[in-house]
Amino acid sequence: MHYTHIAARNLPPDVELGREPAIAPDAVIADCRFGRYTEVGQGVHMTDSLLDDYSYLSRGCELISTDIGKFSNIAAMVRINPGFHPMERVTLHHITYRRQRYGAHAQDDAEFFAWRRRQRVHIGHDTWIGHGVVIMPGVRIGNGAVVGSNSVVTKDVPAYAIVAGAPARLLRMRFAPAIACAIEATAWWDWDHATLVERLPAMGDVRHFLALYGARDGC
């Protein structure tokens, strides 16, 4: 698997997609990894995250400590793993953990920030995250899932589910369980680029696709 690791730099977004990510000049990137054919839009801020093959982030997204699978479609202004305040402390204010900023201590609260990084968000392959969605810390979104615009996702989302609302709730499943299982079992997102291009014509029809590439003995 080829990943480009970027500590903090920008690449031009107007090149044909390939092994190197196409990143808007004003995006702010810190300690992130990118797969092939990936795109990062204008004004994106991302830290400690993975954007895997063929996935893209539209303009204005903000994310931290997030692993995004392949072929993920993320619309504009999405916020993933937003910062949160420690409600169990006497004060909610970040003076208790961003202590250097207030001259309260020589160092910030490293343990708090380490704990926060462990609350990673995981977004599966072939997902669609709508405009303005907020995904809270620690959430897992399954393969093929859809999250409606302006939703607030506080709980895990099953594979191939469609959820929406604040908080997000299940609306329906994209496919019957057997069909969803059969699609997921093909793991088509792991095909190499040449195979993917060759088989694209079949991907517009689920029945045809599974007849050609689905497992013969079921899921």
Image (cartoon, rainbow, N blue to C red):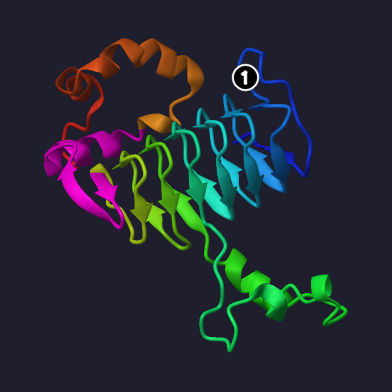
Identify the magenta region: 162-187
Position of the N terminus, as image quadrant, is: top right
Residue 172 falls left or right of residue 57: left
Local secondary structure at mark 1: loop
Residue 198 falls left or right of residue 94: left
Task: Place residue 26 in its image quadrant.
Answer: top right
Q: Residue drawn at (59%, 33%), measured in percent from left and top?
A: 35
Task: Place residue 116 in its image quadrant.
Answer: bottom right
Q: Per the image, is 127 magenta?
A: no
Q: Amino acid at mark 1?
A: Gly
Q: Per the image, is 179 magenta?
A: yes
Residue 197 spot, x, y in % from top left? 43, 13
Along the line of sight, the residue nearer the viewer: 108 or 115: 108
Q: Residue drawn at (18%, 17%), measured in percent from left and top?
A: 208
Residue 78 falls left or right of residue 160: right
Q: Which residue is mark 1?
A: 18
Residue 160 spot, x, y in % from top left? 25, 42
Position of the C terminus, as image quadrant, is: top left
